[in-house]
Image (cartoon, rainbow, N blue to C red):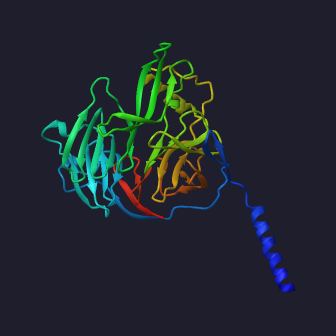
Amino acid sequence: MNVYKILFFLIAAAVIYNCSDKPVTYTIETIGGIKHYKNTGEPSAAYKPETKFLFEIKGPANVPDSMKGFGRIADLVCDDLDNIYILDELHGVVKKYNSKGEFERYFPEQSGDDVKYVKSPSQIVLLCDTVIIYGKGKWLDYLSNGQYLFSKEFYAGGTEIGSMKSNGRDYMAAFCPKKRKDRTDSIYYFSNNLHVLSRRFEPQTVIKNIKKYIDDKFYFPDIMTSFALKNDIFYVADNEGSAYRIYAINARGISEYVIEKSNKDVPYNNYEMHVINEMNKTYGFNDIDTTAVYYKKPVSAIEIDRNNRLWVKPTVFRTENNKDSTYIDIFSEGIFINRTVLDFVTGNETFKLAGNFLFVISADGRSVRVYSYE
């Protein structure tokens, strides 16, 4: 009997110790009927992607000279069979590869009726078996085998778009920037709403409303942000201030929950402030006060892996030791898992998750490395 009592007390003590020793890494607070996952920034678990290099794609060789290699990779997508569609912005085509990295075809042909191609396409998405590319106010629809379907152009006053993405099946979305005048007080403002797009490429449901008056307090970065889309949930980073906040919003524009995480503010340096003012000049906005301190947004990109984990690229302080490092914050169901480093991605390269692959686009946009990951 004494042995059982001793064993019972040992087990109870171990349970009490483990419960008391485990730090609280997040809390859930309901605000206005919406759950807010408030993460302290301390890791709740340990996860580092196990990656394996598969192959590198440097562009096709057995094609006309004007199509060899890559001019400049703008973006890429994968279908359900892990076929890879790489948008070559400089060559103005989509270059299709199978899941083994073998070249199959490019489209559209750069000859014949100019309605079937666009110069300098910058964005690409998939909707089922349809490949949609966009550039300079023109849309093109192709079947995944390269067959032309139709095109559409927006003329003066039409809607330009940015950062177009899709869930691969039934939703595509993009930012729709516009400079407008308020009808009430006649003050100009800039909107950059994130919209679900119709199949005719027209703005429909507003997912995130972004509107800033163009006055002395106008700050160009406040109208810019990033988002990711999977199934029918949009994950949109906050566009204002330096709070680490990501909104999970469904396709009807209704908030599902909010992810928050503690972070340290990272100020812009003098060169970055100069770049912002150059952007202001380009769009006709006033310069910002370069003697003031402005902070970077804590979220610079969002990707979603095949297990529905968020891979968030955070803004970090850069030193000589970490200037080329690519960090990612991992979240699962709103909870911060941990921060890790993708040590095979340099600071000037771009990583992307699509299909079952992890892609790394080279800094010069002339090649892409393909990895598996767990």
| Residue nearer the viewer, 109 or 15 | 15
In the image, 316 versus 121, the foreground residue is 121
User: Taking 139 as reference, is 147 left or right?
Assistant: left
Where is residue 138? Give x, y as percent. 27, 34
In this picture, residue 257 sits left or right of residue 193: right
Q: Position of residue 269 (x, y in %)?
A: 58, 34
**Residue 290 shows up from this direction:** yes
Front residue of 321 and 188:
188
Looking at the image, which is closer to me, 310 or 298?
310
Q: Residue placed farthest to the left in the image?
A: 112
- Image point (30%, 47%), residue name: 87
x, y percentage for residue 353?
43, 54
- In the image, residue 314 sits, relative to residue 284, either above or below, namely below
Q: Quadrant of residue 32?
A: top right
Q: Residue at x 55, y 23 (%)?
A: 288
Check the picture and name the quadrant holding the N terminus.
bottom right
Q: Residue at x 29, y 23 (%)?
A: 156
